Amino acid sequence: MGEHFSIADAYLFTVLGWCRFFDIELDEWPALSAYMARISERPSVQAALKAEQNRS
């Protein structure tokens, strides 16, 4: 993630989220785990994930 959040960041967050469906643990890559944690803290991401859960 550079200075500004971009569509590439949103896409990487999505793709890394798919890892759980393939039993891929991100613990082997601490930088990616930290990245996921930082992105998940964003209020817009939390709102989007909540909205997605409500659709299911």
Image: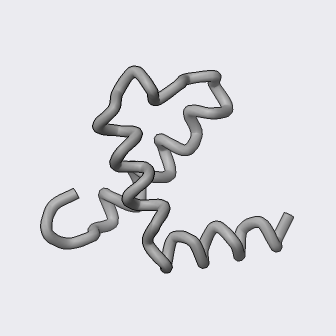
Residue 45 against residue 38 in the figure, above or below: below
Horizontal side, residue 36 vs residue 3: left or right:
right
Tell me the quadrant of the picture where the C terminus can be found: bottom right
Q: Position of residue 39 (x, y in %)?
A: 40, 61
What is the total number of numbered labels drawn onto the structure image?
Answer: 0
Q: Position of residue 10 (x, y in %)?
A: 40, 61
Depth check, front residue: 40 or 4: 40
For the point 49% across and 78% down, the residue is 44
Depth check, front residue: 30 or 10: 30
Residue sitting farthest toward the left: 3
Residue 35 against residue 45 in the figure, above or below: above
For the point 34% across and 49% down, the residue is 35
Residue 19 against residue 28 in the figure, above or below: below
Horizontal side, residue 29 vs residue 2: left or right:
right
Determine which quarter of the picture holds residue 2: bottom left
For the point 48% across and 61% down, the residue is 40
Determine which quarter of the picture holds residue 47: bottom right
Determine which quarter of the picture holds residue 54: bottom right
For the point 22% across and 57% down, the residue is 1
Depth check, front residue: 37 or 3: 37
Residue 32 against residue 28 in the figure, above or below: below
Q: Position of residue 16 (x, y in %)?
A: 47, 41
Q: How is the image coloured?
A: one colour
Horizontal side, residue 37 vs residue 23: left or right:
left
